[in-house]
Amino acid sequence: MIPQSQEQGRPILRLNNDVFLPAEPAANDDPTQYYNSADLGPSSLCGSSWALTFNDPGRYEYFCIFHRQ
């Protein structure tokens, strides 16, 4: 969430599109691009699964923005 100040009252909390919207700029991994599955699950508008193909074998780090801590 991104807090947006108001003249009066509490800030409005806006959804961060970098988190809540999927981003797949290419079908295969490109380390210069940002990839994001968005929110996944049974009640998600984005569905319950997401895949990305890596060009080279190896170890790739990732994290869940919702459970990062």
Image: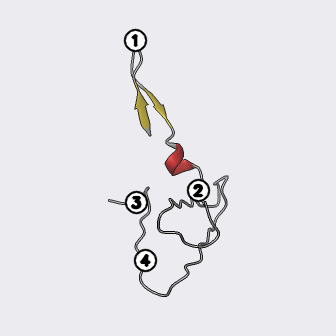
Disc with the residue nearer the chain's start (4 vs 2): 2
Residue 20 in the image: state x and y as whole percent: 55, 49
Q: Give the residue at mark 1.
A: 8
Q: Between disc 1 and disc 2, whose residue precedes?
A: 1
Residue depicted at x 54% and y 44%: 17
**Residue at mark 2:** 23
Is 32 positioned to the left or the right of 55 in the image? left
Residue designated by label 4: 60
Numbered circle sitting on residue 32: none
Q: Quadrant of residue 37?
A: bottom right
Q: Earlier in the sequence, mark 2 or mark 3?
A: 2
Using the numbered discs, state the Cα–Cα distance from disc 3 to disc 1 in whole angstroms. 32 Å
Q: Which residue is mark 3?
A: 67
Q: Residues within 10 Å of mark 4 (few under 14, many from 20)?
A: few
**Mark 3, secondary structure of its residue:** loop
Q: Residue furthest left?
A: 69
Q: Which residue reaches farthest bottom?
A: 57
Along the horizontal axis of the image, is 46 left or right of 63? right
> Do the CB atoms of the residues marked 1 and 2 lie less than 8 Å apart?
no
Task: Give the spatial CA distance, label 4 vs label 2.
Answer: 17 Å
Q: Nearer the viewer, mark 2 or mark 3?
A: 2
Expressed as whole percent of the image width and height from the top left, the position of residue 48 reads 64, 65
Viewer-side label of 1, 2? 2
